[in-house]
Amino acid sequence: LCLNFVLLFSIKLLHSYYNMRIAFIGQKGIPLKFGGVEKHVERLAVGLCQKGHKVFVYTRPWYTDSKLKEFKGVKLISLKSIKTKNLDAISHTWRASWDVVRKNYDIVHYHGVGPSLLAWIPRLFKSKTRVVITFHCHDNVHQKWGFVARWFLTLGEWTAVKFAHDTITVSKNLQMYCARRFNANTVYIPNGVDKSKQEEVKEIKRYNLKKDNYIFFISRLVKHKGAHYLIEAFNKIHTNKKLVIVGGSAFTDKYVKKLKKMAEGNENIIFTGSIRGGSRLWRELHSNAYLMVHPSESEGLPIVVLEAMSFGLPVLASDIPENMEVIAGGYGFSFRNKSVRDLSDKLQYLIDCPELVKQVAKDGERHVQKEYNWNDIVESTEKVYEEVLHDYAINKEHKKIISINVK
C-alpha cells in the first residue's frame, strides 16, 4: 500500500512538472522593443516554452500589438492599461491579476516590486496556484517618481518577499539587501545574455558612424540612468569620436529636452531615439562602438551592460554595486558614481589607450558568456517553479495523511 502511494504520488509530480502552465505579469509585453524587464521576460518565456511548458505573457496594447496572439510559441494576452506614468503598470497588473484567478495556471510569475503589490490576489483567490516574484531593481530610488509612488514602491519591496511562495533576485547585491532589510531568503538568478552576432557597418552609416569612431549609451532616457552626466563629461574631453545616445522618453519628455539642450553646439552628439532591441541597427551599434558608457545611479543587474560585453564591447560604468558585480575583476572600467569630473577623466584616458580597451573587452566577453548564460538561467528558474509546486504537493498529501489518521 505504501509503495503504491509513493509511485502514484511520484507520477503525479512528474506529470505536473513536465508541462506547467506559467503566466507572466508586470512586463509591458513581448517581443522586445525596449526595456530590461521586457528583455528578461521574453528570453525566459521563450526558453520555458521550448522546454515544453505552456507560457502566457500579459501585454499592453501600446507596447505589443493586441492582434498578435503568439510569439515563438508563447501565448500573448492583451489587456488595456491606463497609460500614464503612475497608473500604466499598476492598472495593467490589476487586470492581469484578476484574469489569472479565472484561469488554471500552475505558476503566476510577477516581475518587479511595483506589480508585486497585487500578488495577494492570486494568493488569496487561487490557492492552488504558486506565486513567484522577481525583484529586478530598487525602483523606489528612481528620480522620475514622486513621493507617493516611491512610498508604494518601497512597500512593493516588502510584498515582493512576503507575498510570494518564492522570490528571485537578479543580483547578489539585491539578494543581500533582502536578507538584511527583510530577513528574507531569496533565490539568486541573474539576468543573462546569448552569444551575440557581430554585424559589419551598414545601417549606422545614416548617422555618419564608422567602426570605433563613436562612444555608445543605450537606455530609456530617465534621470537615474545618468545620460546628463555623460553629455556633460563628453563636452569636456578632446576627441574626434562621436557620442551616440540611444533611447527615448519614458514619460520623461522634459528630461529629454534638457539632454538635447545640453548637447546643443556639439555636432558630435547624436540622438537616435528608441531602437528595437535585437534589430540589425541595434546589433550594428553594439558591434562597432569603441566604448559603451553606463552612468546609471541605480540598477538591479544591468542587462545593457551584459549585452554590450557579449558583443566584445568594452564598458565604462558607474561604480554602484550592481554594475561592479558584473565588471569587477578586470572585466570593465568604472568611475565614481555621479562624478562628471571622474567620468571625463576616465573617458579621456580610455580614448588614449586603445590596446588596454581591447584586451579588457575580450576578457569581459568571455566572462559574461560563462557566468550569465541564458540556458542556465531558464533551467534555474524552472527548478524554482518545480520546488514550489513540489512543496505544495507534499503539504497537500501530508494533510490528507493526517486527515486519514485522525479518522
Image (spheres, helix red, strand yellow):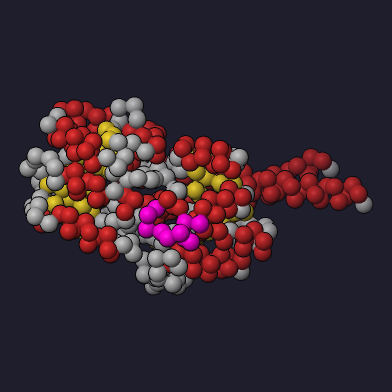
The location of residue 203, given as percent across then percent down, is 14, 54
Q: Position of residue 182 (x, y in %)?
A: 59, 43
Q: Residue furthest right?
A: 407
Q: Is residue 336 magenta?
A: no
The residue sitting at 51% across, 40% down in the picture is 177
Question: Is residue 368 toward the left or the right of residue 354 in the image?
Answer: right
Q: Residue at horizontal 92%, vertical 52%?
A: 407
Residue 44 in percent (x, y) is at 44, 50
At x 10%, y 43%, the residue is 241
> Between residues 322 and 404, which one lies in front from this camera angle?
322
Residue at image location 47% in from the left, 56% down from the top: 150
- In the image: residue 64, left or right of residue 20: left
The N terminus lies in which quarter of the figure? top right
Q: Compared with residue 236, is residue 101 higher up or lower down, i.e. above or below?
A: below
Residue 374 sits in quarter: top left
* Residue 75 appears anywhere in the view: no
Instruction: Using the image, determine if residue 159 lies above or below residue 58.
Output: above
| Residue 223 horizontal side relative to residue 106, left or right | left
Write down the region rendered in magenta. Answer: 142-151
In the displayed structure image, the side of residue 292 where residue 163 appears, left or right: right
In depth, the one of 279 and 304 nearer the eye is 304
